[in-house]
Image (tube, rainbow, N blue to C red):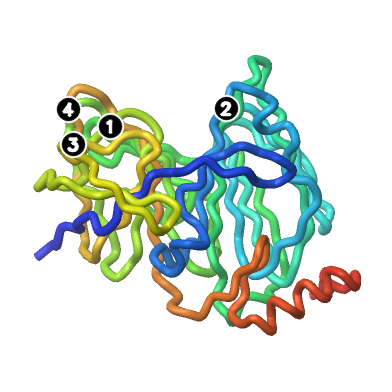
């Protein structure tokens, strides 16, 4: 018998300053380790003011993780130490596996009206793959399949398999699912999940219920503060939901549709040593990474 997943934690994104001065909203990150394992961080950057984002993310290193950038509005120019460069446009995804080490830059440019919107998700790499050869996947919006999950519900599948369709980001070490899902108003749909996987949903637009009991809840910010939220458990933009174990998430809308990011992955359950843009398993591995970066031996020939 299928078991319905319950909401285990509710987080509200919080304003954060990153890079050379980019204003964004941090959904979860360092303070939530290891709740979202194998995911490490999710940032939401939405702005109509170029001063919020034009400073960008100049050259910086990564090791031990994958960064997944998904753009809704505007564009991001990028380049890296293994010779990749280009532009991430609306609907596109950049899936970068840092592995043993990569140095790159990401410079948001916005659109002709000054709008910039998108997300960056970090996924951990298991210890056995921390030092794998770095690689890059540039996925255009046209390559991302959009499928019907149920009447009135559609999903753009970036990675993993939903409704019998597999996303274009294939051969990912941790085998996650990642999708952009929209459910029309006045609908109720089940989302089937592999048991034992950690699952989160982040609401982008609209509102919906993800708890069939509609219990009141408390939400968390910055990993330590809880506040009573006196409402009917309808989830709105900027809200991230982490679920307990089970096979199905039930999504119910009323007078408006909802759009949300959906991600699921099997937890690694490995030690995490994290400082800035580098995530390893031990503090000694972190010290080695930063020493190599300073000495100019960070980039490996693999």
Where does the N terminus fall, quadrant-wise?
Answer: bottom left
Residue under label 1, please give it: 207
User: Residue 75 vs residue 272: left or right?
Assistant: right
- Local SS, label 4: loop
Q: Along the polypeptide, which appears first: circle 3 or circle 2? A: 2
Q: Residues within 10 Å of mark 3 (few under 14, many from 20)?
A: few
Q: Distance between the Cα atoms at labels 2 and 4? A: 28 Å
Q: Along the polypeptide, which appears first: circle 1 or circle 3? A: 1
Foreground: disc 2 or disc 1:
2
- Local SS, label 2: strand
User: Residue 277 vs residue 79: left or right?
Assistant: left
Inspect this view and state whether residue 93 appears.
yes
Q: Along the polypeptide, which appears first: circle 2 or circle 4? A: 2
Q: Along the polypeptide, which appears first: circle 2 or circle 1? A: 2
Between 235 and 151, the residue placed more toward the observer is: 235
Q: Distance between the Cα atoms at labels 1 and 3? A: 13 Å
What label sits on residue 254 in the rendered view? 4
Between 261 and 271, the residue placed more toward the observer is: 271
Foreground: disc 1 or disc 3:
3
Residue under label 2, please give it: 47
Residue at 40%, 38% (x, y): give it.
238
Residue under label 3, please give it: 231
- Local SS, label 3: loop
Q: Distance between the Cα atoms at labels 3 and 2? A: 27 Å
Counting labels gives 4
Residue at 17%, 32% (x, y): give it.
187
**Looking at the picture, how far across and down is residue 80, in whole percent?**
80, 52
Q: Along the polypeptide, which appears first: circle 1 or circle 4? A: 1
Foreground: disc 3 or disc 2:
3
What label sits on residue 163 in the rendered view? none
């Amino acid at each position: 018998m299928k078991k319905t997943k319950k909401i285990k934690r509710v987080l509200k994104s919080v304003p954060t300053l990153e890079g050379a001065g980019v204003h964004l909203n941090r959904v979860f990150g360092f303070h939530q380790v290891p709740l979202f394992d194998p995911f490490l961080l999710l940032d939401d950057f939405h702005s109509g003011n170029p001063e919020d984002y034009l400073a960008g993310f100049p050259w910086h290193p990564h090791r031990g993780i994958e960064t997944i950038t998904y753009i809704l509005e505007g564009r991001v120019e990028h380049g890296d130490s293994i010779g990749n460069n280009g532009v991430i446009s609306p609907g596109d995804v950049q899936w970068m596996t840092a592995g043993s080490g990569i140095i790159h830059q990401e410079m948001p440019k916005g659109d002709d009206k000054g709008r910039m919107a998108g997300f960056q998700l970090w996924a951990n790499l298991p210890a056995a793959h921390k030092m794998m050869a770095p690689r890059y996947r540039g996925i255009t919006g046209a390559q991302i399949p959009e499928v019907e999950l149920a009447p009135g519900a559609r999903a753009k599948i970036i990675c993993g398999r939903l409704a019998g369709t597999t996303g274009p980001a294939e051969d990912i070490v941790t085998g996650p699912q990642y999708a952009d899902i929209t459910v029309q108003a006045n609908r109720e749909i089940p989302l089937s999940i592999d048991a034992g996987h950690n699952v989160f949903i982040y609401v982008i637009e609209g509102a919906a219920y993800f708890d069939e009991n509609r219990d009141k809840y408390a939400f968390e910010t910055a990993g330590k503060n809880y506040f009573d939220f006196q409402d009917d458990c309808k989830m709105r933009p900027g809200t991230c939901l982490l679920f307990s174990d089970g096979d199905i998430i039930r999504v119910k809308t009323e007078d408006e549709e909802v759009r949300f990011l959906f991600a699921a992955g099997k937890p690694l359950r490995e030690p995490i040593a994290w400082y800035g843009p580098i995530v390893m398993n031990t503090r000694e591995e972190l010290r080695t990474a930063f020493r190599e970066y300073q000495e100019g031996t960070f980039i490996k020939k693999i």
